[in-house]
Amino acid sequence: MAKKSAVEKNKRRRRMVDQYAAKRAALNAIVHDKNASPDERFEATLKLAQLPRSSSKVRVRNRCNVTGRPRAYYRKLGMSRIALRELGLAGDVPGLVKSSW
């Protein structure tokens, strides 16, 4: 099990990313617009820098929904390999069968 503080911090970051997504997208569109004047682009860059750092999408860490583990995360399932194995052995994942040869 991951530290509760790390899991909660990541949840807070996800909420912040959702909150600032529209504003950040609008500012990024201005910054990357080649037809905009350099002054407009510079102002948009400054406004982008004023936004909270944790509102950036790249600061969110993928974590297992079951255990909070940050590594060996399967995006399609939303959980780590260890949690997947435990749930699979318990028979809670449909279609997953333990291999043996």
Image: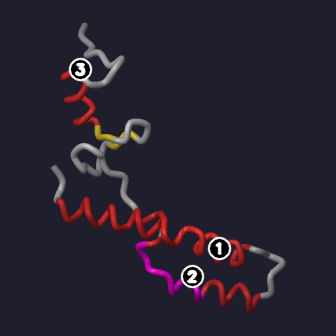
User: Does residue 62 appear left or right of residue 4 in this picture?
Assistant: right
User: Which residue is nearer to you in this view: 57 or 38?
Assistant: 57
Residue span colored magenta:
46-54
**Whole-percent x, y for residue 12 in the image:** 34, 67
Q: Secondary structure at mark 1?
A: helix
Q: Can you tell which quarter of the image residue 8 is in?
A: bottom left
* Mark-to-mark CA distance, 1 and 2: 8 Å
Hey, what amino acid is under mark 1? Asn
First in sequence, mark 1 or 3: give its number.
Answer: 1
Q: Position of residue 58 (x, y in %)?
A: 46, 63
Residue 91, numbered circle: 3
- Identify the residue at the far top of this view: 101
**Tag 3 secondary structure:** loop
Callout 3 amino acid = Gly
Given contact means CB atoms under 8 Å apart, are the residues at marks 1 and 3 in contact?
Answer: no
> Does label 3 or label 2 sit earlier along the sequence?
2
Residue located 46% across and 72% down the image? 55
Q: Where 7 falls versus 86 (above or below)?
A: below
Disc 1 from disc 3: Cα separation: 46 Å
On the image, the x and y values in percent for residue 30 come to 71, 77
Residue 48, disc: 2
What SS does tag 2 mark? helix
Q: Main secondary structure of the magenta part?
A: helix
Q: Are marks 1 and 2 in contact (CB under 8 Å)?
A: yes
Q: What colour-coding does the image apply?
A: secondary structure
Q: Which residue is mark 1?
A: 28
